[in-house]
Amino acid sequence: MSDDHDQLHLDLHRAVDELGKYAIVLHVSSEEDVPKSEIYRFINHIMKRSVQECMANGADIVGHVKSFLECPEGNIMGSIVEADQEEVAMKDSLKADHLRNFEFTMHVIVHGIWDDVVRDLTRSILDEVFDDYSMDFEILDDHYELEKGMDHH
């Protein structure tokens, strides 16, 4: 397929679904032990702030926001399906009471704004969120716009 045809095909998909999709992968580290309760607070905080930013800037419905914390000691999965959800639903398979390093992946899917806007809004809250924790982050990867949109073809 030509690039013009690919772009037209992607534009047609977006006109139909009107979903903004974004995924980010972070390496999170700390010089001290971070208790599991603080990790839960972090997951809740970062996911809810991303949703709040998207909803305040044009999104009208949450499609699904999910996260996956992974490390040798296990994982924690998080899920938000409604903008006003009080707490992130979490499934905990982490076999440690504290961590110093983990990989954190978050997928944000909302209706009403495009991928690049979801990306910018989500990235804009990172410093604010991490200021509340004794943890540092490095962005390992992120996916949005054409990279994700054309994958299924």
Image (cartoon, rainbow, N blue to C red):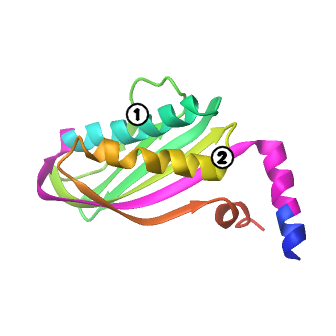
Q: Is residue 133 above or below residue 54?
A: below
Q: Position of residue 91 (x, y in %)?
A: 37, 42
Dot 1 and dot 2 residues touching (CB under 8 Å): no
Of labels 1 and 2, the one closer to you: 2
Q: Is residue 141 left or right of residue 102?
A: right
Q: Residue at x 17, y 49 (%)?
A: 134
Q: Which mark is residue 103?
A: none
Q: Is residue 122 above or below residue 149?
A: above
Nearest to the observer: residue 61 or residue 127: 127
Q: Is residue 86 left or right of residue 2?
A: left
Visible residue check, residue 1: no
Residue 13 forms part of the magenta stretch: yes
Q: Position of residue 48 (x, y in %)?
A: 42, 34
Which amino acid lies under the numbered mark 1 shown in the image of this protein? Val
Q: Residue at x 71, y 60 (%)?
A: 149
Q: Residue at x 29, y 42 (%)?
A: 42
> Could you tell me which quadrant the N terminus lies in?
bottom right
Q: Residue at x 30, y 50 (%)?
A: 93
Q: Is residue 141 left or right of residue 6?
A: left
Q: Mark 2, residues whose alpha carbon is within 10 Å: few (<14), some, or many (≥20)?
A: many
Q: Earlier in the sequence, mark 1 or mark 2?
A: 2
Nearest to the observer: residue 18 or residue 120: 120
Please provide the residue range marked out in magenta: 8-37
Q: Position of residue 6 (x, y in %)?
A: 84, 68
Nearest to the observer: residue 119 or residue 153: 119
Visible residue check, residue 60: yes
Q: Position of residue 129 (x, y in %)?
A: 32, 42
Mark 2, secondary structure of its residue: strand
Measured Cα–Cα span from mark 1 to mark 2: 20 Å
Which amino acid lies under the numbered mark 2 shown in the image of this protein? Gly
Q: Which residue is mark 1?
A: 88
Q: Which residue is mark 2?
A: 20
